[in-house]
Amino acid sequence: MHRSSAPNGCSTVLASRSVCSLTAWLFLLTFSQLRAQVPADIARLNQQLAPIATVRAGSGFTDLAPLAPLVSSARVVGLGECTHGTHEVFQLKHRLLEYLVTQQGFTTLALEVDYGWAEILNEYIQTGAGDSLTVHKAVGFDIWDTTEFWEERYRTTSACAGPARLLRGAR
């Protein structure tokens, strides 16, 4: 790093440029080995793809059969999304949650919400107390403010564990 004896702060500017240059080089080195576009990897992934008939919940689960070996022995299944609030993404998540609860026996749901709203939603799921509009108004986190999430409350009963429950908020 070059230090300037100039009293106008030039040494700070040079230091900032050096830090920026170093950061840029580290960034490039870190991501230079990404394999997202390696043809062999893409071909291997394409061999494992299975079509989904629909993203709508209540449409049966025949097309989700390939998931069974992946989730049947799992204790935790994570459902992410490429965007927050996209219609089709939340439809599919709704369908996958329906599948996990009714077909695979999952009974606990963890959402990216604050603790207070998780309590309100959990009470609604467990007891049916209140109405969906009241719960909906208490959300406070826009990614769950979607028609797909509110179409149906998750009061599906598992034969072994009773009503599904919400794991307290994790945000």
Image: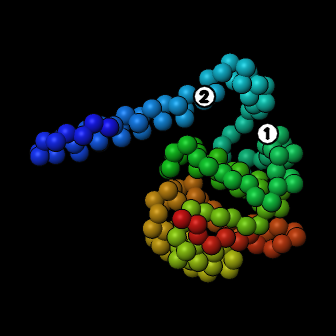
Q: Residues within 10 Å of mark 1 (few under 14, many from 20)?
A: few
Q: Secondary structure at mark 2?
A: loop
Q: Nearer the viewer, residue 125 or 68?
A: 68
Q: Label 1 belongs to which residue?
A: 63
Query: Which quarter of the picture shows residue 155?
Result: bottom right
Query: Which quarter of the picture shows residue 153?
Result: bottom right
Q: Residues within 10 Å of mark 2 (few under 14, many from 20)?
A: few
Q: Is residue 113 left or right of residue 36?
A: left
Q: Is the residue 41 above or below the residue 20 in the image?
A: above
Q: Nearer the viewer, mark 1 or mark 2?
A: 2
Residue drawn where x is 11% and y is 45% of the image: 8
Q: Is residue 153 left or right of residue 133?
A: right
The percent coordinates of residue 166 (x first, y second) are: 67, 70
Q: Label 2 belongs to which residue?
A: 33
Q: Secondary structure at mark 1?
A: helix
Residue drawn where x is 52% and y is 59% of the image: 144
Residue drawn where x is 58% and y is 66% of the image: 170
Q: Is the residue 37 above or below the residue 138 in the image?
A: above
Q: Is residue 157 left or right of residue 85?
A: right
Picture disc at residue 145: none
The residue sitting at the top extreme is 39
The residue sitting at the front extreme is 5
Q: Amino acid at mark 2?
A: Gln
Question: Label 1, label 2: how many angstroms apart (C-alpha)?
Answer: 35 Å
Q: Is residue 103 visible?
A: no
The percent coordinates of residue 131 (x first, y second) are: 56, 75
Q: Is residue 69 visible?
A: yes
Q: Earlier in the sequence, mark 1 or mark 2?
A: 2
Look at the numbered discs 1 and 2 and tell me whether their residues touch, using CB distance below 8 Å: no
